[in-house]
Amino acid sequence: MSSQRERNDPKSRKGPNSSKKSGAKAAFSGQSKPFTKDKPRDKGGNAPAQTARVQTQTHSQTRAKPSVRVSEDGWIWGLHAVEAALKNPSRHGPIRLYVTPERQKALEQVAPKRGDLHVRLTEMAEFSGFLPQGAVHQGVALNGPPLEGDDLNGLMEGALRQAHPVLVMLDQVTDPQNIGAILRTCAAFGAAGLIMQDRHSPVMQGVLAKTAAGAMDIVPFARVTNLSRALESLTENGFVSLGMAGEAEHSLQVVLEQQGWRQTGSPRALVIVMGSEGEGLRRLVAEHCDHLVKIPMPGGFESLNVSHATSIALYEALGRTV
C-alpha cells in the first residue's frame, strides 16, 4: 500500500503541459495548483504502482526524443520577452505564466499585476515538456493569445507625432529570427513602427519573440494585405518611401541629405522598405517607392543579411540625428 508521502511525491505528477483549466488566483500569488491530472485510484484510494512507473517512463522518453516537436502556438519564453509581454497593456489574456520560484521573485518586482494572469510554479526540467526543443527559456515562459497589431492608419498617426518619424516595411521577409532582430533594432533606434504583409509574416510568438528580446511588445506593428496600396496610402499622408536595392544609383545617406531629413522640423516622414534576402524588393513594390537607395559596400561583397541592412538604414535615418 502506498503511503501518503508516496502519493504526494512530485516525481509522480505530470508536468505543466496539461490542458486542464484552473481557477488559480491572479498575479504572482504562488497559491495556484500546477496543471495536474489525478491518476486512477484503486478501491482503497491508492495509486497503483505499475501505473506510476509507466507514466514516469513515458514522460522521460518523450523529453529525451529529439524528434518530438512541440508547437510554438501562443508561447513566449525568455526573461526579457516575458517581462515586456506582461507590461504591455495591449496584450490580452488569459495568460498562463510558467516560472521557477527564483524567477518569480524577480518578475513580481518589475511586472505589473494583471487580473488575467495565472501563475504556475514550474521546475526547470519541466519546461522541455511544453516548449520546443532548444528553447532558451531562462526559467520563464508565457502562453496566451498572440498580438494582433495595429491598423495602418493608427501606425501612421502614431509615427507622425514623433520628431523624426520613421517606419520600416518588410517585403516578404519571412524568417522569424530576422523579423525579431529587426524589431529589436527598431526599438533601439526609436523607429515608429513596422509594416508587414499579412499572408507572408510569421505569428508574433516563439523564436521571433525570443530574438526580439522584448521589442515585440514595445514596437508598434501593422499587417497589411497589399504593400503597394499601403505605400500609396503612406504617400498620401506625407511619407517619403525609400526602397533598399543594391542596384540603386544613389546611397541612402545622399538621398536623406537631399530630402533635408536631418534638419529640425522636417516636414515629411520616412518609410524604409526592405526586401527579402533572396529576391530583394518585388517589382511592383519597388515601383511604388519614391526613391531606390543602396548601402555602399566598398569591400566588394554583394549583400547583407536583411536585419543587418535594416540596422544600418535606421542608424543613417535616426542614429545620426542625435
Image (cartoon, grey):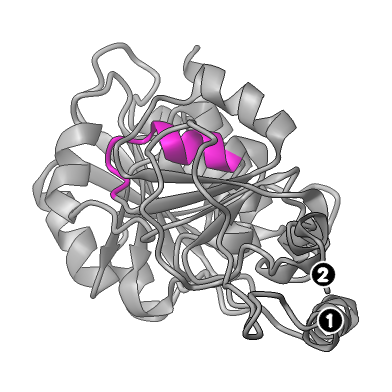
Badge 1 local density, few (<14 within 10 Å), some, or many (20+)?
few
Left/right placement of residue 62 relative to residue 241 reads: right
Residue 261 image-quadrant placement: top left
Q: Does the magenta stretch include residue 87?
A: yes
The amino acid on which the numbered mark 2 sits, given as a three-letter code, is: Ser
Tell me which label, 1 or 2, sits earlier in the chain. 2
Q: Is the Cβ of the residue at disc 1 closer than 8 Å to that at disc 2?
A: yes
Q: Does the magenta stretch include residue 97?
A: no
Residue 195 image-quadrant placement: bottom left
Residue farthest front in this picture:
44
At 44% across and 62% down in the image, what residue appears? 170
**Viewer-proximal residue among 263 and 26:** 26
Q: Name the residue under label 2.
A: 2
* Residue 181 showing in the rendered view: no
Residue 249: x percent and y percent?
Answer: 53, 56
The amino acid on which the numbered mark 1 sits, given as a three-letter code, is: Ala
Left/right placement of residue 144 relative to residue 64 reads: left
Q: Residue 130 carries which label?
A: none
C-alpha distance separating marks 1 and 2? 8 Å
**Viewer-proximal residue among 25 and 322:** 25
Q: Magenta part of the protein: which range?
A: 81-92
* Residue 145 showing in the rendered view: yes
Residue 98: x percent and y percent?
Answer: 59, 49
Left/right placement of residue 132 relative to residue 182 reads: right
Residue 251: x percent and y percent?
Answer: 55, 45
**Considering only vertical position in the picture, is 268 above or below 211?**
above
At 41% across and 47% down in the image, what residue appears? 24
Q: Which mark is residue 49?
A: 1
